[in-house]
């Protein structure tokens, strides 16, 4: 039954009417699947009639193919001798520095990790990781705002001991640093999300797994201890709720998953132009943006219909994501499908932080995040939101944990966030670039650097334990004057009543 | 009777005493017209004895020639074989990227539109569009001030629906974005202002036609629906009021023209050095500035007398413009000649905004504008004036509509202006560069990009309709501290009384 | 008697023991004069045994040679055939653009004037004009602070008429702009200070003549009208008071000199490194700084003893200048020697402005100046001092005139200074660079540009006369927050009493 | 007995099991010493089996070798003919500008000194001197903050006399400038710390000798007068207190040592990446960072165990330094071992300044210092701490002397620090770069420049003596708004009580 096809034969089926692709040496007829593809039909049609393995592999977890295609859609195998010579990636051709050749210990900081990784990984992977919204204002501001905060080192304090351990949601970790849900890790290195998990185990760090991981959650956690290693699962609620419910059921069964991280800062995709530009690198198709709507209608809706144009990796991931989540409907729905604590990611105002705190104990933590500057450009950095909460509703810190991400490049950044009241800080790009620089050892190097820098900073501040860090250790004058003081922030009672009324 | 002339014969008539020019293959004696030319005699004399078509065509609407010259001034036709080979423009020689060759969909933002257009259009057109006053401080500040305002995205809000429609002066439009009166569109592309109108129709956007349009108003609106498409007409009152009265009479007859936009921010021309420098490109004449006055007189007047020196495109357009407009005299005069609502363009202080609001209902809207930074350098951006009005006389927003222009490059800029109280925002250079990049499709691409960016921003703020945007969605701290707080702004009652006294 | 010497003979006399120089074809023995030279012996010794004309000429007024040397010190004449071929200056070799070749009308602003002049003049002249103290912080700040002030254009104001005329000390002038005392004008162009006077006459501008002018005051004013053209004379009081008394006597006889401008902002020379570096250009001597003092003494004095090291043009000019001036002694001494009004130049604090106002009517005006940033680096710009006076002792404006200089590059800068309360603004470098760009026509172009820009600015602000300009036309928020608010400024009564006590 | 070895024989002993090195022509077996080396075993192992003289010499004072090795560890001498040709340093090969060839008088400021020295000295020396923590934010800020302070020159003040002399701890000095404890001076020039002492004698400046000096204290002070020249000794307390006690005993015997400067701002080394990168220049070993800790333990301790990786010069110096100093234990211990006054270096908050003042009279001065930006990046500059003290606990200035270092490049910087209340300012890098530029004459040039600039500044401010400088001479508005105003600084009484409670 398994027929063997010549490439020339496959190449004829390159239209929406008859669309074949080669994956891992097998030939599939995906014509009927086109309309179901979460990433849209166009992405597939660009590869119709060709060997799509290289494009497909690093962004799809194993098993997905079998889950989505019927047996009869597998037509047979390709005769490998008929395949055209392809342009090889730098890694394949040996143009890239080989893994072993990168001396990770000679990399001294996170910026250098990015530099090394940028040379190692494909342009497409770089663009997906590097890109941020519009003009990258928020991405840059995320980091600069830490630089504007001054530290206040104390002298004559015994700093022989230094303990960076803390807890997240009651679970012990050795670092106040976790790896943020970062999608598509295998674009950077075959170790992928599993490699991140290995590095996290080595340093006692927590990891939040992206819903768009390029490996299955089971694969990612398989070499981790059931006890002592902490994972969370990122959820993008799907328009088809049943799909999300199935995912939740699966997570309920994995003991390493300690919480569900509901991502709220990107109900619609931001405009990441670097990513869009890279989409068709290697093909002859011009870059096409995601901005075309039906010009005749002043009112558009973001349903999951097939997009008409090719878009960046980032945009592809969004098709199918629900844009209709609300406090009133989504949290109760979640409670029905999982008993795991909920962490809300993407809070960017003190009002929403306050609101979230009213949903404790179902909601146990919030992550102040502007999605690494990838969603809405000129959105505020987490440092701003921390200062807003301190100013307008500090009781939030008593009710729920506050985590932050975005812009962390130094141990001093970690310490500053903790002084401001954050329980921990997430790093996303740093972990991915670590992976790109040296697989799991590269991620370990990132954690090693940040841990050592954090310890040095704590010692020079005269602080032995995380819980001793506070506002007396930092000078935030240069930032405070820019904190929001507009309407709704004026009186505290009205804050609560206004927000309640809004639900 | 129509004689045929050799070029050599025409070339002899190159002085103020006998000045001939070739236009569209015909030969004209314009000696008597020299002193009447709104752009001054010098501009014509520079072209005396030559084929002036290339210079003349893109900046004069059709019919103007016949209106201004007597039949006997048309001497005959030119023998085309005797014409010298001319230096061709990039577009003509094929050096420019051909229209069709520009893939508009690969252009992702307004800056890229400008980049592409800059390569396509003539140096003279670029200089006219790009130039601004003195050191371009205000032009740059117009945009930077938007970047300093932070957005405040809200989470857990259903953002499936998004509606960018609004009204201007009661007329429905699909976008809160309109095309500002931008002169000389045919310098960029033969589609000219008609092309802008076509793009506006496609996206339901309003257009304000420049008095210095390179096409007649009738040509511009000819393919637009009488109902559903909104145009305004920009008026520069002429020293010879009769000319302006004739224009108003013509507008009163065009049903698509819904209002008169009286431009007040440039009673005398600003100093646009890029424009001045480009004036004589292609000729061997050195650049000459407009700054020479009679040194012996400490008092000069800006009447419409023939300028002695060549000046930039911008300065040429100003000859004949009245500098003696006042609240007391001009608005009543206007009322006599048109029943159309009046929109005052160029308000730059809260005092003038307040004053304008006292003239409702004749005055129905004001446009906060520093003329794109083209008039007085270091004049405040519209964002400053919006914040001033909010602080000192917010009732202005209740009495009249407030529109803004200057510096808009992103959908987030549009949204920020609306949050601050603006009813809509105008784009001028973006539309012209869109035209330069790809004719009417280029303008459409500009509107498409801005519409999509605006929608993304609204959704990520958790806002479904324009009227929901407000100060709670933005953080203006970094701008507010620079807002005017000098005399006249100190007490509100004195504001009104002081201003009344001034009339 | 007039012997004729060969160059080889002269060249032997190149030491402090026997020092001959050639000047204008004559040979002088200046051995005895070495210790008397106001610029120090070293400057002369560097040229000992050579033709010093090129160095000497542009920085010494005619007649100075005869005044200072005895007849017998003139030894004879040089045999021109024996002179070595010298390196010619760009102007001499024709490498420089010829005067006529510079199209002054194509120069659109003050920065371009400087650019053109920089190419025309010698490196030494450039260094002297361009240089400022230390790191040029104050020089740059002088200009930037104007850029931070925003203008507030008013609309619907008749701006047909515009009158830039005003008065200084009661004398009518056509411009609120004057030429600051700028030394060594002939370094830039043979027209020198006389050329500046000619340009000032053309535009009705005032001129303050530098004590270090390269022409005699009589030469400078010789072609000016006795009535209607206003000059001041800058005085650096000499350690040998008799010299200054002789100068004052000479000024009392020149009817065009309307006041004495006593310069106080540079009792010791600032450190102008560009100038120091240029000093020996053309010679093989290394650059030597003026910073060497007797290291064994912690206490040094600035008497007029011969400096041991070569220094820049600026430092040379200072030898002989008195550093012991005081309110108590110097003003009475001045009153004894001249009845002319006194203008104090170099006020940089509101305390000194207030103090000066107590000396009216002898003192009729002050000039807020940090010496073009040439004296003490990080000294405040005049804009700061204007705002300080407004805040702490505004009555100063009622008692005396307040002039400013430093950083003026645009008509908008002129207008802003006037809005802040200045009666007029001085330009120094602009005039010198104008001279360098095109002699007296170049200076005229500078005035023409500034006049036109000032008028445009006034018109767009809706202002017809200078006296209408005020704080309501500018927004100084971005500057005000940096104004001094330390001790002595806290209470007004204590200001006066503290200052009085100090005298 | 003294055997003669061939290089090939020595080269075999290049492991931790058998480690020989050649020093000054002798062969040593340092195997047993590896674990005792204050700089760690790795540094030695990198040079095992080779001639280590070039690496060893400039960073170890004479006599240290004999002190630490037993006689039997000296195995014999090397046969010089068998030594491999080594890569010579620029100075050795003549590639560097020879000392005599640098015309120190042509160097006009401190930046130029650094420029010249950078060309002269080895890359390793440059890296050690230039490097600072992390991203060099504090290092740059140290200087920029001086530039933001404006000076307030006064006029009409007799400035003939100017006296820069002052006292430190009651000892007369001719300058308010001292040389900070700067390690490893012989890396820059053979004159080393002795050369600095010579220059200080010439200018009457104080010198604080680094504990890590490359010469013995006796050598450094040997040519200095017992009376009239002031030295301090910097102490890094060693984990093995007996070592420090021995040092103190030695200092008690040196009459020129007037105080002990206890360095507290670097109990653990900062992260100086430039220094780390340079460590192995010249060898083939890759750069290795100091950041590796045992990843399995969340708690690390900084004991003096042998580090596993090579580190920069700076890190090497830290091994053995105690991290367990406290107010309660260390000052009494010091009192037992020396009667010399104590100066505490590294105060960075007003709280610690206040605390130190409670320990007078044992503590006689504090040095506000962030270790030249070399310890904790984004630590505050001394100017901030000065302003904090002025605001929250000005009585500190009455109780103890306050010295500052970091960022001083100009005489105006010196004067500004004095105006803010500092008794004197230290320069570290400037002295080392002076040494690199020209040995002791280079250091003298640095002092000469700073003295002359300081005098010019004082004169132009109208100030004759150091003690006349005050807050009325500077405008600190641009800095004040960034000064810490967080908790603990809010009320004064609580300051003292809180701090007391903490002891």
Image: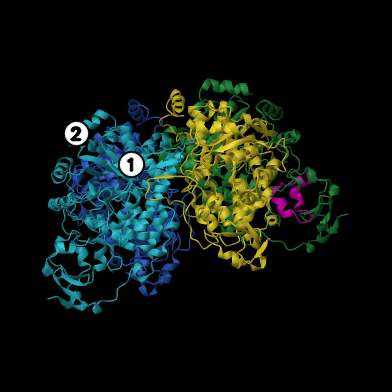
Chain colours: A cyan, B blue, C green, D yellow
Q: How crowded is mark 1: few (under 14 residues within 10 Å), some or many (20 or more)?
A: some
Image quarter of the N terminus of chain D: bottom right
Q: Nearer the viewer, residue A103 or B124?
A: A103
Q: Which residue is drawn at 57% across and 65% down?
A: D11
Q: What stretch of residues is rendered in magenta?
A: C42-67
SS at mark 1 in the image: strand
Q: Answer with mark 1 or mark 2, whichever residue precedes in sequence.
A: 1
In percent of width and height, residue D215 lies at 65, 47
Q: Distance between the residues labelled 1 and 2?
A: 33 Å
Magenta includes D260? Answer: no
In percent of width and height, residue B279 lies at 43, 58
Q: In which quarter of the image is residue B196?
A: bottom left
Magenta includes C62? Answer: yes
Residues flagged by tags 1 and 2 on a common chain = yes
Q: Residue at x 17, y 61 (%)?
A: A37
Q: Residues within 10 Å of mark 2 (few under 14, many from 20)?
A: few
Q: In this view, does D503 lie above or below B102?
A: above
Q: Nearer the viewer, residue B474 or A304?
A: A304
Callout 1–callout 2 Cβ contact below 8 Å: no
Q: Tell me the number on the disc at residue D357.
A: none
SS at mark 2 in the image: helix
Badge count: 2
Left or right for D59, reference A492: right
In percent of width and height, residue C245 lies at 73, 33
**Which residue has dot 2 on it?**
A500
Which chain's residue wears label 1? A
Q: Tell me the number on the disc at residue A166.
A: 1
Q: Can residue B28 be seen in this view?
A: no
């Amino acid at each position: 039954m398994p027929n063997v096809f010549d490439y020339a034969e496959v190449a004829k089926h390159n239209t929406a009417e008859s669309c074949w692709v080669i994956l891992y040496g097998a030939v599939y007829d995906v014509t009927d699947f086109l309309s179901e593809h979460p990433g849209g039909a166009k992405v597939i049609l660009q590869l119709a009639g060709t060997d799509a393995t290289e494009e497909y592999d690093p962004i799809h977890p194993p098993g997905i193919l079998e889950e989505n295609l019927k047996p009869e859609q597998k037509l047979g195998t390709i005769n490998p001798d008929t395949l055209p010579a392809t342009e090889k990636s730098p890694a394949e051709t040996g143009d890239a520095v080989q893994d072993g050749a990168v001396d990770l210990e000679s990399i001294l900081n996170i910026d250098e990790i990015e530099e090394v990784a940028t040379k190692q990984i494909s342009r497409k992977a770089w663009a997906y990781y590097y890109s941020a919204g519009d003009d990258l204002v928020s991405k840059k501001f995320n980091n600069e705002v830490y630089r504007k905060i001054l530290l206040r080192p104390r002298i004559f304090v015994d700093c022989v001991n230094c303990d960076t351990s803390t807890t997240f949601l009651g679970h012990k970790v050795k670092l106040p640093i976790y790896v943020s849900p970062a999608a598509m890790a295998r674009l950077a290195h075959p170790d992928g999300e599993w490699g991140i998990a290995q590095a996290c185990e080595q340093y006692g760090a927590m990891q939040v797994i992206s819903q768009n991981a390029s490996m299955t959650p089971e694969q990612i956690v398989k070499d981790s201890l059931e006890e002592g290693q902490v994972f969370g699962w990122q959820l993008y609620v799907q328009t088809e709720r049943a799909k999300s419910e199935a995912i939740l059921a699966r997570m309920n069964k994995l003991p390493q998953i300690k919480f569900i991280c509901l991502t709220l800062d990107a109900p619609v995709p931001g405009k990441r132009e670097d990513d869009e530009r890279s989409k068709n690198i290697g093909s002859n198709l011009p870059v096409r943006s995601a901005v075309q709507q039906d010009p005749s209608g002043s009112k558009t809706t973001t349903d999951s219909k097939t997009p008409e144009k090719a878009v960046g990796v980032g945009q592809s991931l969004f098709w199918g994501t629900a844009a209709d989540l609300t406090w009133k409907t989504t949290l109760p729905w979640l409670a029905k499908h999982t008993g795991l604590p909920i962490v809300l990611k993407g809070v960017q105002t003190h009002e929403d932080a306050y609101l979230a705190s009213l949903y404790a104990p179902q909601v146990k933590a919030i992550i102040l995040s502007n999605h690494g500057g990838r969603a809405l450009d000129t959105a505020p950095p987490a440092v701003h939101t921390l200062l807003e909460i301190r100013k307008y509703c500090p009781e939030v810190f008593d009710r729920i944990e506050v985590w932050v991400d975005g812009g962390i490049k130094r141990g001093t950044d970690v310490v500053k966030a903790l002084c401001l009241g954050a329980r921990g800080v997430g790093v996303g790009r740093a972990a991915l670039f670590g992976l790109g620089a040296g697989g799991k050892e590269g991620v370990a190097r990132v954690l090693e650097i940040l841990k050592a820098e954090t310890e040095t900073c704590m010692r020079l501040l005269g602080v032995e334990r995380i819980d001793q860090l506070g506002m007396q250790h930092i000078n935030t004058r240069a930032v405070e004057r820019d904190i929001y003081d507009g309407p709704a922030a004026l009186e505290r009672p009205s804050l609560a009543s206004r927000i309640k009324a809004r639900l």
